[in-house]
Image: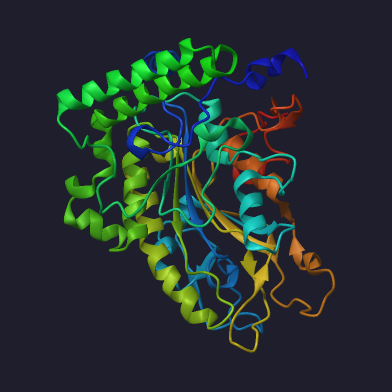
Amino acid sequence: MDEGNASVCSQPQHFHRRSLLHGIGGSLFLSPLALALARQEEKHKGGVPKSVILLWLEGGPSQLETFDPHPGKKIGGEVRGIETTAKGITISNLLPQVAEQMHRIALVRSVVGKEGDHERAVYAMKTGYRPDPTLNHPSIGAILCHQSASHAEIPRHVSILPGNWPSRGGYLGASYDAFKIYDPARPIPDVQSWVSPPRFESRLRGLQQIAEREFARGRRQRGSENWQADGATTAAARQMMSSDQLAAFDLGGESAEERARFGQSPFGRGCLAAARLIEVGVRCVEVTLGGWDSHVSNHSLQGAACATLDAAFAALVHRLAERNLLEKTLVVCGGEFGRTPRINPAEGRDHWPHGFSVALAGAQVRGGSVYGSTNPDPKLDAKEPERDVASPVSIGDLHATMLEALDIPYAHEMLTPIGRPLKIADGKPLLEILDRGHPRGS
């Protein structure tokens, strides 16, 4: 590993507790000193580092009912193709509002994975690596938080409506796990003290005394790190509890018209909250929408999920563009795999990692572009289904593309806990859908 990678490989000290005071989650906070340094760094660089919003479609959305329709074909099902604001690009008629934003969106229609099980495929899509019993890889949100500063006083990595497998910090530590909240219509739990301010301060002093006493009893070698982490964790929790940035979670200040534009659903509210969180410096927000696992009644299930996704995705892209935030925010929309071209006897589609779609917008993504394609007339009994995919894109390639768009050097290496150097992403970026000439990772 060369000297140029040294700053990337050196990992900052981070906490190893999964919760903060009164149960506040384990995503990375900045101490007051680190916060000041982060702000100074941003000012020196002349701008705010990029952020990512992941619209996670849990269960496996059908590419044929969303971003890669083949109407009129044997595999096409009941959808129609509709024109979009990007010339020559058609998508499913189930996403009419997204079609109006297609000039800002790029489609990768040839993603090919190697996992057909939900849990394993989620892991691969969120980290860029297949599951490994010897190592837990960090998600892209954890990577982004690790590699960039933020002025946020609240968690920098947030999961809204977390599904079965929310994003984790992996070998970077639990402090990089996503901070989990649910429907933004409800207040954030555990950020208000349950007792009066004097009693609260008294409890904190008691906690400090206990920690110091335990440290003094001789747990120096192992206990000193935990004691310091406890103090930093408590300080971070107090900082969040008193921060004005908590207002970003509260949608009450938004107009009724704006809330309606995102759709009256928890997912729509989650997307609106994601936009607000990005404005105050949160680095990664993951918003989960379930309902895509359509082994039976594929068209009705996909149609219902698309109705929720359509308003929220379109409104999110529009709002970010309207507020000049889209250039600094990468929006990624996809799930763990696609659905089979073949419609099964229960009128459903099954798991299909052999050529599915992911949509990207913002950052350096070239809107109105498409990469790859799938065969509208595949041999449904073929033993090698990937032959029906033109310009296949691996999960590693997809991650390299996202990191490239976020200005993260995807090919640089980080050290795992056992000292093993590992690339941030094991793939090559799709420069065809990015507005830049030369990759940072090369």
Front-most of 14 and 144?
14
Can you see residue 133?
yes
Q: In the rendered view, would you say 248 is above or below 341?
A: above
Q: Quadrant of residue 73?
A: bottom right
Q: In the rendered view, would you say 278 is above or below 222?
A: below
Give how far across and how far down residue 214 sits, in percent: 45, 17
Can you see residue 47?
no
- Color style of the picture: rainbow
Q: Quadrant of residue 295?
A: bottom right
Identity of the residue furthest to the bottom in this view: 345
Give how far across and how far down residue 219 sits, in percent: 54, 15
Give how far across and how far down residue 188 sits, in percent: 28, 44
* The C terminus lies in quadrant: top right
Front-most of 285 and 203?
203
Q: Left or right? Give the position of 242 relative to 107.
A: left
Q: Residue at x 59, y 13 (%)?
A: 221
* The N terminus lies in quadrant: top right
Q: In the rendered view, would you say 289 is above or below 402?
A: below
Give how far across and how far down residue 273 sits, in percent: 32, 47
Identity of the residue furthest to the front in this view: 217
Q: In the rendered view, would you say 78 is above or below 160?
A: below
Q: Residue at x 66, y 40 (%)?
A: 136
Q: Left or right? Give the position of 77 relative to 207.
A: right
Q: Left or right? Give the position of 185 relative to 155.
A: left
Q: How many marks?
A: 0
Q: Residue at x 17, y 56 (%)?
A: 256
Front-most of 65 and 193?
193
Q: Residue at x 23, y 30 (%)?
A: 244
